[in-house]
Amino acid sequence: MSSYASRRQFDLDWMERWARIVNDDRILPVIGRFFTGKFVIGFDSNDYLVEVQDGRVRRIFDGLTPNNFGYDFGLRASSSTWSKFCQPVPPPMFNDIWAMAHPLHENLKIEGNTLPFWQNVRALTRMLALMRDV
Amino acid sequence: MNTHEPIVGRYVYIQCEGKTYRTYYEEAGEGIPMVCLHTAGADGREYRHQLCDPDYTRNFRMIAFDLPWHGKSIPPEDFYLMEEEYKLTEKFYAEFIMAFIRALDLEKPVLMGQSMGGNVCLPLALNYEHEFSAFISLEGCDHSPGWWIDPLNHPAVGCDGVATSIFGLMSPESPDVYRHETWWYYAQGGPGIFKGDLHYYSVDSDFRDRAHKISGRVPIYFITGDYDFACTPEMTEQTAEKVKGSECIIFSGGHFPTSEDPAKFKDVVAPVLRKIVQNDPMARGGQASRPSSSGSDNRSSGGRPDRRVVDL
């Protein structure tokens, strides 16, 4: 998929629709109660900074600036990889963050401080699975 | 209405490497003994559906034990004095399985294991082939690297984080209730036990230089689901090509076939069970189960725009 296509598919409007689905979810406030932080989702070279508080998305920034003071961790992959992940029934090896990041496959990079990633991976997994509903 | 399942649980004391292990096992059925090995960091509940299903228990005495440190099997009594973290090794794992089989006086059982239980079928087939009648290696291969990682034994990562690491190993088309039940088993593991098992799974089970030495005199059936990203179909197929006389079945499913989708698993394993009954060296079992085998695919081994912010 071209970079143009990735901007079109995974643009800020798409991210906003996803975030609103996340914030309407009735399970995330339970399993994500202590998930507060900032992470990056990267589609090709396009980064979005996602601010999460108590399991809800508070802000999405299109790209990063010094004013953001960085982020906790990043999940970066090609838009082609994210497109597979977002299919209603994702194909093998593309159905899960750790599946895509596992050293055997490396279709996605988990960057930065991975400790908050693992601490919140249950809520994060549900959050990202809701991309399939966008 | 109150009902009981046919499963009966007991404890047996197993001696292994100089220590005594109070070991829990469950069983149901009569006929050819089949010892069922759970995955890393889990316990024998992964086989609860099979132990309750007459399509298995009419021909097989199904037995699932919890390894020490797992499920209802407690650690050795001096575990709190250990000077290094728990690490499962091939040597201990294989010797414990053999000690369990001897403690129960099982004669030429079938060994069915999944994940690390599938991998350990290889050394047992190499070193103890005369003591088994068949091996069923579920989600098994001769080298499965990449899982012995510290986040799975970190005091700041909870049981839910450890459990979620395995969630994507299951097929998205497996029933939600069973996928989450499997997740629950993992959330109940002791601290560091899943990671310690993965020392065997990803480090000490490298069998790449030995797989070709297995004689092939005892049947080995490899069964792997296409959503298994730890032991991919290709990894199983490459292993099966090295193991003489083995059969390899790739199906649409995940890494926990017995617990994540028991109905699908029954379809896939039914032809294997029929062959095992028909070819049993001691002619045990009588009525091979004949559920349909739909759904399986048998492969023989062989410049950024202006920056905007959304406020929610």
Image: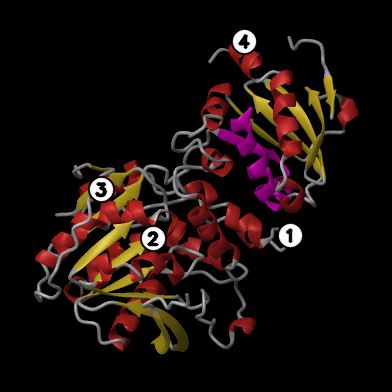
Q: Which residue is depicted at the point 74% across and 20% down?
A: A12
Residue density around tag 1, few if under 14, some if 14–19, many if 20 or more, within 10 Å: few
Q: Quadrant of the C terminus of chain B?
A: top right
Q: Quadrant of residue A62?
A: top right
Name the residue tied to disc 1: B156
> Same chain for marks 3 and 1?
yes
* Residue B19 visible in the displayed image: yes
Q: Relative to A116, is B206 above or below?
A: below
Q: Say left or right for B175 vs B291.
A: right
Give the percent coordinates (x, y) of residue B299.
22, 42
Give the percent coordinates (x, y) of residue A30.
75, 52
Residue density around tag 4, few if under 14, some if 14–19, many if 20 or more, within 10 Å: few
What is the magenta range? A108-134
Name the residue tied to disc 3: B249
- Which residue sits furthest front? B1
Labels 4 & 3 near each other (Cβ < 8 A) = no
In whole angstroms, how far apart are the C-alphas of marks 3 and 1? 40 Å
Amino acid type, label 4: Tyr
Amino acid type, label 2: Ser
